[in-house]
Image (tube, rainbow, N blue to C red):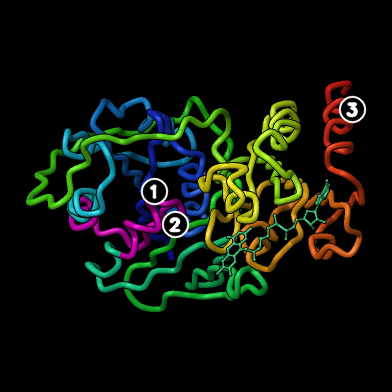
Amino acid sequence: MSRKVLVIGEIKDASLRNVTFEAIAAAQKISNDGEIVGLIIGDKDLNESGNTMIQYGADRVITIVNEQLKTYTSEGFAQAVMEVIEEENPEAIIMGHTAIGKDLTPKLASKLESGLISDVTDIEVTGDNVVFTRPIYSGKAFEKKIISDGVIFATIRPNNITPLDKNENRTGEVSSKDVTIKDLRTVIKDIIRKTSEGVDLSEAKVIIAGGRGVKSKEGFDPLNELAKVLGGAVGASRGACDADYCDYSLQIGQTGKVVTPDLYIACGISGAIQHLAGMSNSKVIVAINKDPEANIFNVADYGIVGDLFEVVPKLTEEIKQL
Ligand code: FAD
């Protein structure tokens, strides 16, 4: 059975987020040779991003450019996406499990009176069923779910589904659609950003995370150095954030960000269950801790019992030599 799948893409800092390409790969499995329609929303010309979605596997892309959609609001985006859904009648809708995806998709699902499977890490198509795998109990188990009635609707966790290879010769239609946004109750006047250098934590392939063991703001310096040589991002435990060694935007865990990088290096983190909830599905985990009994070693693929202030600079030097 083939299906028309709508992929809601996401633009950040004028570029498509990587999870958009992962969502297209997910859509390809679900569509079973049906049409994959991309959708992107913003306030500036989106043609180039539309073409990029096509090069990653979308068949055609609809762009909505509207001054009122310059920054995300759930009301504004929901109105715009609903117009497309009503016109296109997709049998499935896929979006990234990002801050925007988490906010927008339940609103759309309730308008559509459909189910929604969030935070999907794998997709399997068996006969007419699309079986979604997602973590439960803070990542301690996985469940498999299907939507048996209505629109198949899911958000996918970044860094879990491999994007299709980019094909620069692939072509398709990029069309623009006008929408009228009515009665917005929220208007974003300004966004004050923390300056963060480098790679976005939730999409980083390598994360160097620091815990209370880093002992101070300056204690993060060797971690920043290591992240720089590995092209990764720096994260933190809540212990480190609570102690004011770093900003809460770096927090990983149950009440922070959920990450699944290829490599997670935990430095001076004990491995509390709430921290593991945010990182235990990382592909390779390295733990550096002075305490050989620290719980983090129970989830680590490689463990180094030692002082992070000796181990991390040595690692950085070794990697620089490669
Ligand atoms: P600690 O537990 O104090 O561990 C510090 C570690 O550093 C120790 O293992 C020590 O051996 C090691 N160490 C010290 N010095 C060195 C050194 N020089 N070299 C190497 N190792 C060293 N926590 C999160 O992280 N994320 C969350 O999202 C989160 N959500 C929570 C939600 C709730 C409702 C609650 C109750 C708690 C939550 N927590 C969360 C807090 C969590 O329970 C832990 O308190 C926290 O993760 C501990 O942080 P830590 O490992 O950095 O600190």
In primary-sequence order, the first of circles 1 and 3 is 1
In whole angstroms, how far apart are the C-alphas of marks 3 and 2? 46 Å
Give the label, 3 or 2, closer to the camera: 3
Q: Residues within 10 Å of mark 1 (few under 14, many from 20)?
A: many
In whole angstroms, how far apart are the C-alphas of marks 1 and 3? 45 Å
Viewer-proximal residue, 8 or 197? 197
Q: Amino acid at mark 1?
A: Ile
* Secondary structure at numbered mark 1: strand
Ligand 1 rendered quadrant = bottom right
Q: Is residue 134 left or right of residue 6?
A: right
Residue at position x 53%, y 61% from top? 255
Q: Amino acid at mark 2?
A: Ser
In whole angstroms, how far apart are the C-alphas of marks 1 and 2? 7 Å
Give the label, 1 or 3, closer to the camera: 3
* Secondary structure at numbered mark 2: helix
Q: Which region shows up in magenta? A: 84-106
Residue at position x 68%, y 30% from top? 231
Viewer-proximal residue, 221 or 37? 221
User: Which residue is labeled 3 in the image?
Assistant: 318
Q: Are marks 1 and 2 in contact (CB under 8 Å)?
A: yes
Q: Residues within 10 Å of mark 3 (few under 14, many from 20)?
A: few
Q: Is residue 225 magenta?
A: no
Q: Quadrant of residue 200?
A: top right
User: Which residue is labeled 1 in the image?
Assistant: 36
Q: Amino acid at mark 3?
A: Glu
In the displayed structure, would residue 130 be above or below residue 251?
Answer: below
Viewer-proximal residue, 34 or 129? 129
Q: Is residue 291 left or right of residue 109?
A: right
Q: Are marks 1 and 3 in contact (CB under 8 Å)?
A: no
